[in-house]
Amino acid sequence: MKSSAQGLWSVGEVAGRFGLPTNVLRHWESVGLLRPARDSAGRRRYGENDVVRIAVIQRSKAAGMTLEQIVVLLDDGSAGRHAVLQQHLDELDRRAEEIRLSREMTEHALGCRAHDIATCPRFQASVADVLARVGGADR
């Protein structure tokens, strides 16, 4: 990111670089995720540390963290950080298992010769755990 005067960027410059609407940065500020400096006219001026925080926020959101979790993550005085991070790791593990199962199902479907894939016993077996949770297809 090319620096403007004194290594600070306007809200528009930062938003443009990250492909975000400016109101997103303002919202993140309102919930305590960002604390940009202000110039003599009261305009937001984002420094390098703010830019790094924005990158962390974007990566965390892409990984499924809520803004509330990200606030705790970035709060250097938060006693709850480890609990939030462990919960997030547990959720990532759960999602990774769902992705693994979905991949297996998709790979089978790709090579399955059944005309109606839903009638294939092996394909049906790939969703047996879901059916068991909802009490369907008792077999």
Image (cartoon, rainbow, N blue to C red):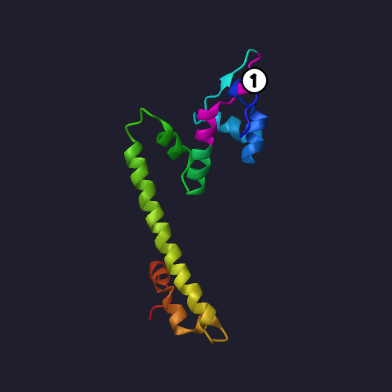
Q: Quadrant of residue 116?
A: bottom right
Q: Which residue occupies 61% across, 23% down?
A: 44
Q: Position of residue 53 (x, y in %)?
A: 50, 34
Whether residue 30 is visible here, answered yes or no, is no
Q: Is residue 124 left or right of residue 26?
A: left
Q: Is residue 131 above or below residue 9?
A: below
Judge whether 114 appears above or below 108 on screen: below
Q: Is residue 65 visible?
A: yes
Element class at badge 1: loop
Q: Position of residue 60 (x, y in %)?
A: 48, 43
Horizontal side of residue 54 vs 95, given as left or right: right
Quadrant that contains the C terminus: bottom left
Closer to the camera in the image, 20 or 95: 20
- Range drawn in magenta: 41-54
Name the residue rendered at 45%, 79% in the picture. Answer: 124
Q: Which residue is mark 1?
A: 43
Is the N terminus in the top left, top right, bottom left or bottom right quadrant?
top right
The residue shown at (51%, 34%) is 52
Residue 138 image point, x, y percent: 39, 78
Is residue 122 inside the magenta stretch? no
| Label total for image | 1
